[in-house]
Amino acid sequence: MTTREYILNALSESGETPVSGASMARNLNLSRNAIWKTIDLLKEEGYDIRTIGKTGYIIHSKANVFDKDEITKLLQTEECEVRVRRSSISTNKTAKNLALQGKAGHGTVVVSNMQGRGRGRYGKEFVSPPKHGVYLSVILDPAKLPFSTPTMITPYAAVAVAEAIEETCKKSPLIKWVNDLFLDGKKICGILAETAFNPKVSDKNWIILGIGINVTPSVEHEKYSNIIGTIFDCEIKDLPVTRNEIAAAIVNRIMKIQYTQEQTIAEYRKRLFIIGKTVKINGEASFNRRRKQAIEAVSYYAVVKDVTETGELLVQNEAGETITVSAGEVSLEI
């Protein structure tokens, strides 16, 4: 056990009873200065450690810091390797690089306290300020997924994250096709699935599943407050649940898929709040290589009717035609 682990365990087990630096130094055969330096580092990581007069230290019982050991203890599988970063450009980028370099495989989880350039579909920014969200990516082997098509991981992940939030936060988010979670009419979560393949290292084609959740309000979110929401409207120190618990609940569901493909779509459909609503479908621009011709994106209005057994959107356009939408972006028209 490291000095860091010993101090965290000692403070956690003591509750509201202060633990003296002298006793920890004696038990570890270290100087009190070494204990003080370690506690100072823990405070920098975000642990709420308080000095109680001259009697010692206590730790806030709901310290909200991402901790590899805390997350691992809560996991229900031994397949996972958790890697915690203080900061990351993007957890998907970090996980993708690890997979492409052959340094990580199925079940590797990258968790970060913040993202410098978090992103969603089509390169859109996902604001990821420090200490206010859950930002993680999981490396998955498509061969180990119980679905007929790997793209099913996106609707399944939406269901898994919604269930994890319901379990840990006692809130009930809804889904906007294909990969956003909403609470009280505002987006609180984005999900991005990407592939990673490097034939020089492995013949595996990995899926990198990225999940970003807004847990508490931040200054960075204020300018988007009309469209971006948070699970809780409180400071991080007042959360009734730790971010470690939220992260672990999500990873447990991703790594232990309990639903068949049919059940996944049924659960997805139950939470899909845009059925029956008029939406704007923003298609993707493309390029015809044979004709060497750019094809402009086409946008149109339609009423959402349902989702298919593989997660595509079924809509009815203004001409009364039923269209299957497998790509593009959907925006609500109020």
Image (spheres, rainbow, N blue to C red):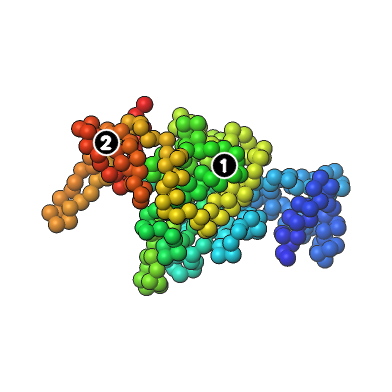
| Residue bearing the label numbered 1 | 166
Quadrant where the C terminus sits is top left
Q: Amino acid at mark 2?
A: Gln
Q: Is residue 277 left or right of residue 239?
A: left
Relative to 139, is 155 above or below?
above
Give me the residue at 81% from left, 45% from top. Answer: 16
Q: Residue at x 49, y 64 (%)?
A: 106
| Residue depicted at 81% across the width and 51% down the height | 14
Q: Quadrant of the N terminus?
A: bottom right
Q: Report the residue that reaches farthest toward the left.
A: 291
Residue 65 appears in the figure: yes
Q: Is residue 161 left or right of residue 302?
A: right
Q: Residue furthest top?
A: 334
Q: Position of residue 225 (x, y in %)?
A: 48, 31
Q: Earlier in the sequence, mark 2 or mark 1?
A: 1
In the rendered image, residue 210, in percent from the top left (x then y), is placed at 46, 52
Q: Pointer 1: residues within 10 angstroms few (<14), some, or many (20+)?
A: some
